[in-house]
Image: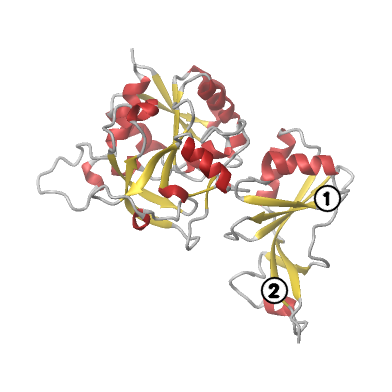
Amino acid sequence: MSRRIAVLAFPGTNSEDETVRILRDCGGDAELVWWSQAEQLAQYDAYVLSGGFAHEDRVRAGAIAALDPMMDAVIDGACAGKLVLGICNGAQILLEAGLVPGTGAVRQPTAAFTKNLPAPHFVCRHVRMRLAIDPARCVITAGLEPGALIPAWAAHTEGRLAAPREHLDEIVAGGHVAFVYAHPDGRVDDGAVPNGSALGCAGLVNRAGNVLAIMPHPERDAWNFNHLARSEGDDVLAPSGGALLFRSFVDAVNV
Amino acid sequence: MTMQKRVVEISLKIPDNTAYTALVALRRLGVDVARVERGELRAFDDGDGALLERVESDETIFNPNIHRVTLRESGAPESGEVWIESLDGTVPTVAWRLFDAGDRAVSGHALRTAVDRLLCNPSIDRAIVGCD
């Protein structure tokens, strides 16, 4: 029997439908769980926090959502080893909740995805995330090839990893940088980074390897219809590159 | 002539949903607070003594339909107030003022709890807490 995945919808979440859809397309038993249903969350086996502007990003991106009662179940589940994937605003929430990089106490953030640099503006750009860890280091990426390139859309104003130097050193030493921005050919350099993110970081994993936070949106490059330039006669509903990460996630949940 | 830096606070004169959300969140965290005020702080040179007039005519930071602007007396927070300053200067400094049920400034303990639990992410912010 497949295990149940909750896709959380806070007030202000806006990517939940396509996230549920790609998880189901990859064989996941995914359901939307609204903020008014927080008491149901403990029954689920895994959690996905999708993109948007939870609680309108008041105070700071992800700060209020990290205190939402829904996060009590997510934090308890993460500490018990359940798989948690955060995308964009979901990633910001996981950092504010202290679950990633997880180098401090719960709800004591040691890093943030914050205002882009050099200009603190909204960025909407197609990007590649390159897997920067041994796939097995993170349960969620275990089904990917080493160095896998995942296409996705960066669509954020606050996607730059920032932390004091000593925390960045700890993030590197602990192998927490799961994904870095890369060029389409896989090269990694500053030119591939759309937002000034420290370490070129596109995604962070916690120490135990069961919580992954990524800033770009692979669910927006998960089907052929997401591509303007596609071959004549292509099946528009066929999966595209972003689906790889969700397939790996679903396979890990169902093990 | 020496330019004098002055701090102005731009706050909402319409209901401040962010301040209200912070109030609800802080109360849920057990902080003894009854009212929250919030404003953005900006420091400008005030060589000509006409700083307020210049800010009020700058449409990029001031909208007279929703904002009020005040000249701060000093360059430091008052009792019951904390200034949250971005470490890399990418966002303006925000002043938060917390009041108890008697509309007095909250205790230093309550203010520091609010800072630690919600108002400041120390990896990107610095909190300057007003003296008790």
Chosen colour scheme? secondary structure
Above or below, B47 relative to A233? below
Label 2 or label 1, whichever comes before in sequence order: 2
Q: Is residue A209 left or right of residue A21?
A: right
Disc 2 from disc 1: Cα separation: 24 Å
- Chain letter for the residue marked with disc 1 in the picture: B
Placement of the N terminus of chain B among the 4 image quadrants: bottom right
- Eyeballing the image, is B2 above or below B90? below
Q: Secondary structure at mark 2?
A: strand
- For the image shown, how many numbered marks are present on the structure? 2
Q: Is residue A146 above or below residue A193?
A: above
Helix, strand or loop status at disc 1: loop
| Picture disc at residue B44 | 2
Tell which of B54 and B124 is nearer to you: B124
Name of the residue lying farthest toward the left: A233
| B94 on left or right of B130 | left
Whether marks 2 and 1 lie on the same chain = yes
Which residue is found at the position 40% from the left and 20% from the top? A4
Residue B5 left/right relative to A135: right
Q: Which chain does tag 2 point to?
A: B
Amino acid beneath label 2: Phe
List the single residue furthest toward the bottom.
B1
| Amino acid on which the number 1 mark rests in the picture | Gly
**In this view of the protein, can residue A145 be seen by the observer?**
yes
Crowding at mark 1 (Cα within 10 Å: few <14, some 14-19, many 20+): many
What residue is disc 1 on? Answer: B80
